[in-house]
Structures are given as structure tokens and as C-alpha cells.
Amino acid sequence: PNEPIIDEYRGAIIRKLYGTRNVRHKKSEAFVVSNSGMMMTKDTSIPSFGILGPRISAEMASSSTYVPEVVGAADSVYGSYSAAALKSHIAAISQTLGINLVLAQEKFPYGVMPSLDELVVGLDSRGVNERNILSQLWSRLIRHIILAAAAAREASLPAAEDEHFDYGLKILSNIPLFEIIQADVKADMLINAGITQKSRGNIDQAIKLFQDALYVNPGDGHAMVQLASLGSTSAVTATSLSDDYVAGLFDGYSDRFEQELVEELGYRGHEFVTDAVIRHGIINRNKKSYTFVDLGCGTGLAGSLLREKIGQNIDFRLLGVDLSSRMTEHSRARLVGDDNDRKRVYNDVYTMDGNDFLAGLPESSVDAIVSSDVFIYVGDLDDTFRECMRALRTNGILSFTVEMPSKNDDAAEHVRKHGMALLKSGRFGHSRKYVENVANNVGFKMVEWKAKVLRKQGKEDVPGAVVVLKKR
């Protein structure tokens, strides 16, 4: 009952099942929840999830007869995550001060911290292994505070959201604790607090929090993107986003990727790059087999089109690679063909950095590389173009999309002058001159640049281009 991971998982399960809408749970999808965890049963006599909310008394929480009221999904998620934050708070203080859980809860209600002297004594008296454990406990507390604050925002509980963020920032202002909390967790706390301030129109406060996040975790992609969205000049000049940020972004987006991007936003980049491969005559009747690479394959949109449009007539090996493990789960399972002849789209799919993958291929072993909506998360294209050049055979082609800034993007001038910038969209924009210069420097010839509308961003068209480079 004292383990916060139970409450964290409970919140995640409810969020997965019902989303963040504040709707009441369907009677036919009820579960019985006990203090020791969640028992998933189709008991239709139980009207809803039983969620132990943050405001119940300790006596009620420990009672096996306690039956909470029926609440909406968003409230249930908040109740679960705030319970996890409370338990993590008690555990961190208990272990730091060397007192039992009951005494920790009595002396230090949620949001109340030990004195600086108490913390210093508690931390300084520990060996390396014990300090590592305390680092994990305080980092876990910050993570649960972030979850609780975000859930409060989704449940339209601004006072509760502020309470959690205020406590998290108070912990980070304590130097002994600041020093032992993991850097990425500290950055996440500052970024999420910044997002709240941004949503409320407090732009200066938001920028300060995002800049602080970059200070504690240099190169943090999420902080950089948030600064770019506010037109910060320090973000516009970025040349890359961290692999962790990009992988995490698409891990979280994978299950709804195609519905939102293709069906709702009209994304067509995968069509553009595969059509370009066919249009530029990569298929030679005298050649019996081919090897293609889908660089940043995602869920397999481009791979499916390649397999459907040219895979019926020739024998070709299709390799996919993506940073996101959740994306590659989808692409590995992707099938094409009718019910009587279903085939896997990819021969192999790899979860790794694209440049590292290309570097591991034999030189001059690939006929074509397609990359749809990938280089917009790469930034500086020099290393990627060099690895593509090495892997491609002579006359092999690289077909990809790039994004260009809209007229009202502050980064447009930087793209015009320097060829590349991190846009307000959180994606990199590239100019034709930049792409052509980098391509020429590594030995490619640009054989196509066609302006295209890649997708919608809200109600606005996202301008871009489909580009084809050929190895000389």
C-alpha cells in the first residue's frame, strides 16, 4: 500500500483507457480497486473505478471498507498521480532523515520539507550507495509531482496544479537536494512548470524556466523546442535536437500517429518521397534485386507505399530504422497485400540512430534511401548526407522532405541568412541553398526540388519541399 508505483500505474491505465476527458466511466467497463493494487474484473455491479483521492484521511485510506465516490476519468487520473506524489514525498523524507513512514507523514505533510540543517545532516551521514538511493527517491518524487501537476491541469484543477509545481520548484531551490536529483528530472520539472506559465500567458516566466532547464541539462531538446515556440533567439540558432527528446516525442505519439498526422492533418510526405523514387527511374530492368532503406521509418507509411508500388514487379530488400522503439514496433508488424497474400513490409527493422545504422552498412550497398519528415528533426544535415553517400551505390538516390518557415515565423530571416533554423513548430527549417550546398560538398547532385504543402498545422499549410539527390 505504501508503494507509489501502484498509484502511478493505476493513473496510466485509466488514462490509456479513457484519455483525458473528464467523463464518467462506463458501467460495463468497471474495475475493482483495492489499496494493494488493481484487480481487473468485469464486475458490472461496481459503478466505477475506486480511486483513492489525495484528500482522504489516513484512516480511510487504510480501511478495506472504504468505497470512494464515483468520479470522472480526468479526476481519477489526478487522484492516482497525486497519491503517488504523496507516497513518494513520505518515502524520500523518511529515508533521508532515517525516520519511519508514519512519523514522516505526521511531521511533514505534502508540500512541507525538513529544515536545511536536517537535510544536510541526513545527506552527509550517508555513504555513496545510500546517497544513490536517496537520489533515486528524490528524483522519483519530482517525477510524480510532474505527473500530478499535469493531471491536475487536464482535470481543470489550477489550484492543485500550482500546489504541485510550487512544491517541486521549492525542492529544486534547496541546494543539497538540487545536487542529488538527476539532471533530466530537474529539467523536466522546470519545463513542465514553464509550459503552465506559457499556457497562462506569462511568457517571461516561461522563458526563464525553459532557460533554467537548459542550464541544468544542456542540450535538452524539449526545452529548446519550447523556447523556439516563443521566438527565443537562443533556440533559433540550434543545430540539433537530442536523440532522447526525439525518441521520447515519437514514443508518446506512436499509437495515434497515423490518425492525427494523415487523417486529420493531411500529411503526404511519405507519398512525395516514394513517388520520387519511381519518377527518377531507380528501377532498371536488367537489375534483379535492390536494397532500399527507409531512414526514420516511423510506423511504416513510406515503406508500405514502396512495397505496394514497386514490390510487385521486382525483388527488393527493404530495411527500416528509427530512434523510437514504439514506432518500430508498429513498422515491424506492418503488412501489405490482400487477405490471401499478406507480407511484411520490411525485411528488417532496427531501433537506433540513423547515422549509426548507415555507418554499419557495407559501402555502396544501397540503391535508394527515402526519408519522410525526418530531417526536420535532424537539423545539421552534413553527417547524415555523408553517411547516405557512403552507403549508396553510384547513381543511387536519396529522396526526402524538408520544411520551410511560414511567413509569420520569426525564424524565417535566420533561415534566409544561414540556411537553417529551429522553427516555432519545434522542427528545423532548411533553405534550398543550404541543402544544395551540403549535398554538393559531399558529392551529391540535386536532381529535384519541388515545393509542396507537407501537412496542416492547425488551419495553416506547412510549406516544404520534396528533394532528390543522386550519387555521382
Image: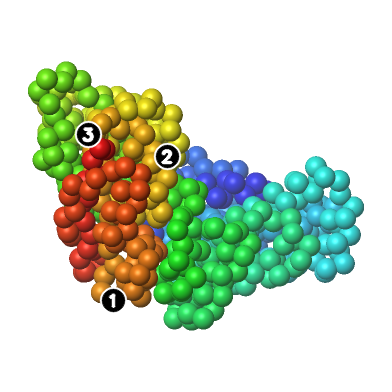
Residue at horizontal 42%, vertical 39%?
355
Mark 2 neighbour density, 10 Å: few (under 14) some (14–19) many (20 or more): some
The front one of 20 and 401 is: 401
Give coordinates of residue 35: x percent, y percent: 59, 47
Residue at horizontal 21%, vertical 69%?
459
Q: Quadrant of residue 82?
A: bottom right
The three-letter code of the residue at mark 2 reads Asn
Residue at horizontal 17%, vertical 59%?
451
- Mark 3 or mark 2: name the one nearer the start of the chain: 2
Mark 2: which secondary structure? helix
- Mark 2 or mark 1: name the one nearer the start of the chain: 2
Question: Is 238 placed above or below 320 here?
Answer: below
The three-letter code of the residue at mark 3 reads Asn
- Please give the residue where the numbered disc 1 appears in the rendered image: 408
For residue 356, side relative to residue 176 (left or right): left
Between the residue at mark 1 and the residue at mark 3, the CA separation in whole angstroms equals 39 Å
Tag shown at residue 355: 2
Give coordinates of residue 137: x percent, y percent: 70, 51
- Please give the residue where the numbered disc 3 appears in the rendered image: 395
